[in-house]
Image (spheres, grey):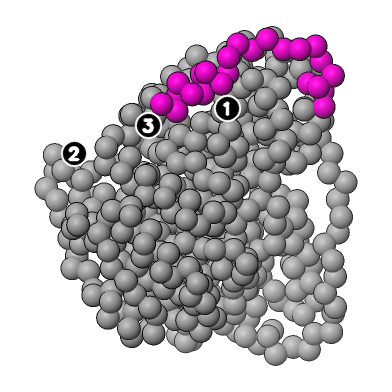
């Protein structure tokens, strides 16, 4: 797992065995595809002469590569030693220059034994260019009176340029889940979900939308499935992926990394006459206030706790599972660093993501505080991974919200008027799990002061720690 926008070319790499080793990583690959995270999976496969014949080999699948093609961006089968380096070149070229995702390379076990003498080589450089009608874009930007910027995860590496653009246009910036941390505390920032009515009101009143590195997917823009997202007026859309640009109608599309486009837009606007865009800061402030009220007291309570954790651990990376505080933060939360708030409660939405992802972040960024936010249900999917944190002495704080079941699903089923089924699995005793793993443990009520006190007690610890937050106890 990775965080941040500047390292999009560096993949996570997994080596797995034929069959069950590969099926075990399918969920992680699907999550990586949904999150545009670069991931290289290298697997074995049964001997080449046996493939597709159903001979009963150990770990045999009917067509392993066909299965991988459903989740991998690309899948390469290696027939000879000479095939391997071109496949690696293609994979790393993709990671360096295109939208991230999982790539699979499989090698038959008989090919694994072949001699291999080729040397690794650097990724070929590419003169990245883009072409768009500058005059047409500038005319739209200059004539807009109430522009709004929609920033997605593709903008994570462009905080300074985004701030400069927003200030020049006096445009509120609505941030999707993966864009949180951009424009932290800025008066033009709107760290609120476009699923909320308050944010949609802001968007509906815009006479121009500038969509930057966002796929405009329903997990951000229509989380509740009410199909009330307003039309995106006169949209100018910038994305690295041409397929994304073809999926939503736009007045102007620009296929390029935002790191290239935004500085040019800022420079062009800087040389233009002063723009009269009304009071974008007032529009942003009004939206923030309305969104805060809209999320309701239960979600506000969770967000207050997230704010307290952010204050206690500035510039930390929060890695989340599908659990109530993460849902609250996805609706409204202003993180203090780009790439520092990401979770599995959007996109593919795989339960169990948070623990291994937090471990991956801690390995990739050893000097950064990592806080894992998971629920008692989601944590049980990947509890064995805790021993990796122990073995590697990773100072990850694992916060487990325990409401004795799948609380959010229970609430949703009740709201839909259906019989609640399968939402109350008995949680394990996390204190004994921590003891079994040799991990320090604390338990507290869901009160900001109690949680921050527990967290503070582990900040100087040089390994993992677990804090169980009892959602069923108020004191």
The front one of 52 and 386 is 386
Q: Secondary structure at mark 1?
A: loop
Q: Earlier in the sequence, mark 3 or mark 1?
A: 1
Residue at image point 54% right, 63% down:
369
Disc nearest the viewer among 2 and 1: 1
Of residues 295 and 24, which is closer to you in this image? 295
Which residue position holds label 1? Answer: 188
Looking at the picture, does residue 35 appear above or below residue 203? Answer: below
Report if residue 279 lies within the magenta region.
yes
- Residue 418 in the image, given as x and y percentages of width and height: 14, 43
Q: Residue at x 31, y 79 (%)?
A: 433
Residue 33 visible somewhere in the drawing: no
Residue 218 placement, left or right of 426: right
Q: Nearer the viewer, mark 2 or mark 3?
A: 3
The secondary structure that dominates the magenta segment is helix
Q: Is label 2 in contact with label 3 (beta carbons under 8 Å)?
A: no
Q: Residue furthest left?
A: 419
In the rendered image, which residue does mark 2 sit on? Answer: 416
For disc 3, the marked residue is: 292
Contact, mark 2 vs mark 1 (Cβ under 8 Å): no
377 on left or right of 185:
left
The residue at the point 20 percent across, 62 percent down is: 404
Quadrant in the rendering for residue 437: bottom left
Which residues lie in the magenta part? 267-289
Q: What separation in Å lies between label 3 and label 1 (alpha carbons)?
A: 16 Å
| Distance Cα–Cα, label 2 vs label 1 | 36 Å
> Please, what secondary structure does the residue beneath circle 3 have?
helix
Q: Earlier in the sequence, mark 2 or mark 1?
A: 1
């Amino acid at each position: 797992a990775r965080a941040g926008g500047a390292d999009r070319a560096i993949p996570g790499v997994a080596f797995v065995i034929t069959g069950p080793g590969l099926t075990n990583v399918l969920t992680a690959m699907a999550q990586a595809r949904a999150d545009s995270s670069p991931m290289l999976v290298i697997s074995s496969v049964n001997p080449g002469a046996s493939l597709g014949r159903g001979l009963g080999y150990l770990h045999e699948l009917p067509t392993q590569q066909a299965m991988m093609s459903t989740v991998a961006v690309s899948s390469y089968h290696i027939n000879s030693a000479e095939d391997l380096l071109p496949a690696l070149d293609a994979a790393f070229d993709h990671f360096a220059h295109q939208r991230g995702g999982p790539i699979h390379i499989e090698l038959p076990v008989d090919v694994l034994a072949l001699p291999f003498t080729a040397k690794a080589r650097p990724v070929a450089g590419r003169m990245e260019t883009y072409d768009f009608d500058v005059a047409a874009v500038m005319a739209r930007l200059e004539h807009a009176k109430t522009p709004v910027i929609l920033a997605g995860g593709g903008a994570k590496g462009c905080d300074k340029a985004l701030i400069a653009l927003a200030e020049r246009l006096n445009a509120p910036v609505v941030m999707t889940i993966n864009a949180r941390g951009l424009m932290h505390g800025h008066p033009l920032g709107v760290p609120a979900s476009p699923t909320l009515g308050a944010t949609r009101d802001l968007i509906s009143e815009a006479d121009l939308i500038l969509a930057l590195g966002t796929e405009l997917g329903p997990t951000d823009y229509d989380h509740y499935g009410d199909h009330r997202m307003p039309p995106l007026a006169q949209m100018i859309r910038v994305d690295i992926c041409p397929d994304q640009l073809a999926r939503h109608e736009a007045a102007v599309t620009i296929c390029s990394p935002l790191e290239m486009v935004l500085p040019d837009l800022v420079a062009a606007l800087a040389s233009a006459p002063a723009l009269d865009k009304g009071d974008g800061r007032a529009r942003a402030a009004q939206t923030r206030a309305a969104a805060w009220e809209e999320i309701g007291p239960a979600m506000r309570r969770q967000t207050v706790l997230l704010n307290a954790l952010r204050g206690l651990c500035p510039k930390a990376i929060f890695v989340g599972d599908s659990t109530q505080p993460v849902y609250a933060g996805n609706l409204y939360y202003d993180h203090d660093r780009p790439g520092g708030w990401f979770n599995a409660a959007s996109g593919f939405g795989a339960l169990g993501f948070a623990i291994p992802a937090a471990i991956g972040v801690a390995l990739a960024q050893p000097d950064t505080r990592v806080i894992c936010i998971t629920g008692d249900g989601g944590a049980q999917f990947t509890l064995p991974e805790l021993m990796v944190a122990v073995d590697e002495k990773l100072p990850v704080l694992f916060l487990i919200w325990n409401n004795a079941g799948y609380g959010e699903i229970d609430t949703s089923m009740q709201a839909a008027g259906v019989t609640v089924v399968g939402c109350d699995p008995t949680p394990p005793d996390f204190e004994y799990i921590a003891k079994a793993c040799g991990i320090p443990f604390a338990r507290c009520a869901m009160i900001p002061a109690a949680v921050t006190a527990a967290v503070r007690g582990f900040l100087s610890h040089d390994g993992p720690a677990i804090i169980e937050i009892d959602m069923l106890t108020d004191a």
